[in-house]
Amino acid sequence: MSTSKTVLDIEFPNYISAALPYFIIFFVLEQLFALIIKKKDDFLLKDSFSSLSTGLTTIIYEKIVPITLLKSIEFIVVIYIWIHYRIVDIPEDSKLASVATFLLIDFGYYWFHRLAHEVNYMWATHVTHHSSEKYLGPLEWIINTPSHHRVHHGRNPKYIDKNYAGTLIIWDRLFGTFQEEEEEVFFGLVHSLGSSDPTWCQIHHWYDMYKRTKHYPKLTDKIKVYLCGPGWRPGIPRMGLITDIPMPHKGDIAERIGEGLTVLLNTYIISHFMLISIFSIVCLSVYEDELGPTRITCTMAYLYLSLTTFGAIFDKKRYAMTLELIRLVLFIAFTWDALNSTVQYIRLFYFVSSAWVIANHFSGLSFKSKLK
């Protein structure tokens, strides 16, 4: 996974690719700190898995889904216009220019982020960022602090559509979207996603908008579903009514996320999730050129299958363990001739896992609660 990319002979740093291994490392360290030092679990395994798998799914899409070409084309067009038709040249060594461009970028981010909440089709691309139910003085008048961003991710009625700023909170103060943290913040979406499927997490709001358009006979109302706020319906303001938003309460996270799995099954998922994630990241960051496009695509497809399978297990789908057995067998089959000792150890682990899945699947011991 290259830490830079070249567009029209101009090289740009690929920050997400470079930071990805650190995301996972610090996630594990933070979890260990919570369990060992604080003596409590600050995370819900199912919720943490959903957040990580959604992020990994985005990377998979960038590698194997053709629609991501649109993003590349957009980037190329912007760079082409800058090369050939820019109005001014900004000196790179100018402190004034650096400050001015920083302010302009931060100002632009505020409005893009605000529109991503207030225009429904744009919210569909941003909604996954708000799906997690858990999160961890004078500067607060200027800088977007953790407290301000907690408010932004809150589902409390008074916190909805507030604090859009990237770095400087002054934009929210200027345009009337600022809100102090005045009561306990309950994180997540107003209406719980109710699934750990990474694909559903990406597309569920598009499907919801489509279903809503079928209820409205007028073409203008159908269009407004996509262009107004997520809470809009005919006869009410563009951004919906604050009274339509349910008031959260302590203990409702368990109700929203649902019953957990057994300790043994949680351990199984965590071990396989970490294994396939690290394996895929190593393939991308170390062996991408050596493996070539076809094998990298297959690796990404297998990672996607794994994330989907783990999500099905968390959601207690009837087909989950059958899909997991297929996933295990596929890895064993495709690495059968591999002589690398690390791959051989992983394959042995998959053999043992297959035996465990078969025993649990056919004995009906996979889940404590009723399957869906």
Image (cartoon, rainbow, N blue to C red):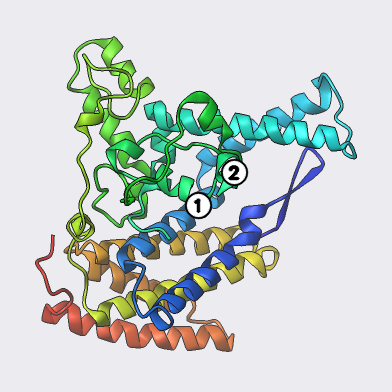
Disc 1 target residue: 146
Query: Does residue 310 sit above or below 15 in this rendering?
Result: below
Query: Does residue 32 sit above or below 52 in this rendering?
Result: below
Distance CA(mark 1)–CA(mark 2): 10 Å
Q: Position of residue 138 (x, y in %)?
A: 58, 46
Direction front: furthest residue:
138
Per the image, label 2 sits on a secondary structure element best described as loop
Count of picture labels: 2
Q: Quadrant of residue 44?
A: bottom left
Residue at (45, 64) in percent of width and height: 303
Q: Amino acid at mark 2?
A: Ile
Q: Is residue 38 left or right of residue 261?
A: right
Q: Which mark is residue 143?
A: 2
Q: Of residues 294 and 93, which is closer to you in this image? A: 93
Residue at (38, 36) in percent of width and height: 124
Per the image, label 1 sits on a secondary structure element best described as helix
Q: Of residues 49 and 291, which is closer to you in this image? A: 49
Q: Quadrant of residue 339?
A: bottom right
Q: Is residue 307 left or right of residue 157?
A: right
Q: Which mark is residue 235?
A: none
Residue at (50, 54) in percent of width and height: 60
Whether label 1 touches label 2, CB < 8 Å: no
Q: Amino acid at mark 1?
A: Pro
State the quadrant of the N terminus. Answer: bottom right
State the quadrant of the C terminus. Answer: bottom left
Q: Position of residue 15 (x, y in %)?
A: 66, 53
Q: Of residues 159 and 355, which is closer to you in this image? A: 159
Q: Position of residue 187 (x, y in %)?
A: 34, 51
Q: Position of residue 294 (x, y in %)?
A: 58, 59
Q: Is residue 313 left or right of residue 3?
A: left
